Image: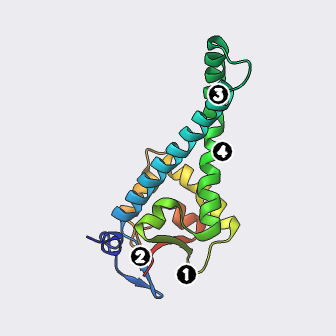
Amino acid sequence: MDEIELAADSAGSGEEMGGLVRAGLAARVMALLIDVFVVHLLYFCFFLLSCAVFWLGPFADLFSFFSFILLDLVFYFFTFPLFVALYFCVLHGWSGQTVGKIFMGLQVKNSAGGDLSWGQVFLRFVSFLLAMLPSGLGLLWAFVDDEGRGWHDRIALTRVVCLK
């Protein structure tokens, strides 16, 4: 099954919407899983890089190294939400695609089929977080929605489409 077939495989997918083909839910879930992997991989690489920079420093000893790792973990724990927000907001605002969406051949468009405004990007991210709060109900809503849109897509007036 190629990317376009997978991207248009479920929940009324393949349906034309003003010349745009709605993305299937399976492709959207797969794109999100890829993004979760990429975010964690990038973040882990930044963590290892900061540890390596400290370890190679002139005052590196075992106690200070482990102290630094503990401090680094606390710092990264608190900055991870900001990193995630930047990843999704910058990539969606720049091209309407994250790494996962690029791989799956998907793109986020506004309801009229145009590019997203930065306000829509921010609103979509914040409403995505809110949609996850009630046990993911806002995301699962896409399975019962006529257009396959979750709460975050409804609130921000966006849709995910397949690239042809």
Judge from the rendering whether residue 34 lies leftward or rightward of residue 4; answer left or right. right
Which amino acid type is shown beneath numbered disc 4? Leu
Label 4 secondary element = helix
Q: Answer above or below: position of 76 versus 154.
A: above
Instruction: Report the Cα–Cα distance between label 1 and label 2.
Output: 11 Å
Q: Earlier in the sequence, mark 4 or mark 2?
A: 2
Instruction: Report the Cα–Cα distance between label 1 and label 4.
Output: 29 Å
Label 2 secondary element = strand
Badge nearest the viewer, 2 or 3: 3
Residue ID for mark 3: 72
Residue ID for mark 2: 22
Residue ID for mark 4: 82
Which amino acid type is shown beneath numbered disc 1? Gly
The residue located at (34%, 79%) in the rendering is 14
Which quadrant of the rendered structure holds the C terminus? bottom left
Which amino acid type is shown beneath numbered disc 2? Arg
Residue ID for mark 1: 113
Instruction: Report the Cα–Cα distance between label 1 and label 3.
Output: 43 Å
Measured from the top left, where is residue 22 in percent x and y? 41, 76
Badge nearest the viewer, 4 or 2: 4
